[in-house]
Amino acid sequence: MKILWILGVLLLTLSPTAIQDFIRQNEAAANARDVAAMVRFFAPTATITLAQPDGNPVTLNVPQYQALLQRVMPQYRSYRNRMVVSAWHQTGDRIQVNGTTYEAIDSPRLNAAANWEAEVQQNGDRLQFTRVRAYFSQAFGS
């Protein structure tokens, strides 16, 4: 079973505290193995581009992506996701976070990998992804 990993760069216009809160919430959702809890940070109008095994991408909005997760994820015993922030740098009101997200699906047949980037804004006490680009590919084991 191959290990799934995501290498991502986030360009944020948030305070360091908001970033830490996002990471903590992301990890809490991951530890609960609740994929939908992680997706709740996405703005409903955000789009997610998934790369198919044949190389042709398909673009989904967040409700479509949530429906896909509801259909696909129950097939697997669990789903693990953990974000590890390797570095972050603030210039004015913009924060760039370099991080790696490790993911694995407990299945003898399936793991997946993705690269993604996002623009995030703070709306009250909630972080909102206003633009998300994700590149998702699946690697099937034997």
Image (cartoon, rainbow, N blue to C red):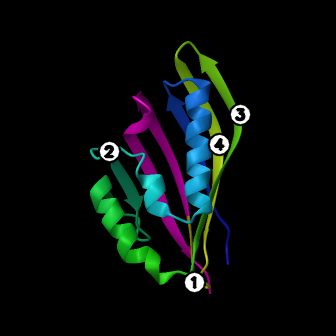
Query: Residue tagged by mark 2?
Result: 46
Q: Nearer the viewer, mark 1 or mark 2?
A: 2
How far, Cα to Cα, is label 2 from label 4? 21 Å
Secondary structure beneath dot 2 equals loop
Which one is in front, 68 or 52? 68
How far, Cα to Cα, is label 3 from label 4? 7 Å
Horizontal side of residue 11 vs 61, given as left or right:
right
Name the image quarter holding residue 54: bottom left
Which one is in front, 63 or 47? 63
> Which of the numbered marks, if any, corresponds to residue 87?
3
Q: Main secondary structure of the magenta part?
A: strand
Q: What residue span does the magenta drawing correspond to?
A: 113-142
**Quadrant in which the C terminus appears:** bottom right
Residue 68 location in percent, x, y?
34, 68
Secondary structure beneath dot 1 equals loop
Residue 125 location in percent, x, y?
44, 32
Question: Which kind of residue does numbered mark 3 sit on?
Answer: Ala
Question: Which kind of residue does numbered mark 4 sit on?
Answer: Gly
Q: Which comes before the other along the chain, label 3 or label 2?
A: 2
Secondary structure beneath dot 3 equals strand
**Residue 122, relative to residue 43: is it above or below?**
above
Q: Which comes before the other along the chain, label 1 or label 4?
A: 4
Horizontal side of residue 87 vs 50, given as left or right:
right
Question: Which kind of residue does numbered mark 1 sit on?
Answer: Arg
Residue 61 in view: no
Question: Which kind of residue does numbered mark 2 sit on?
Answer: Ala
Query: Residue tagged by mark 1?
Result: 109
Residue 97 location in percent, x, y?
61, 33
Query: Residue tagged by mark 4?
Result: 99
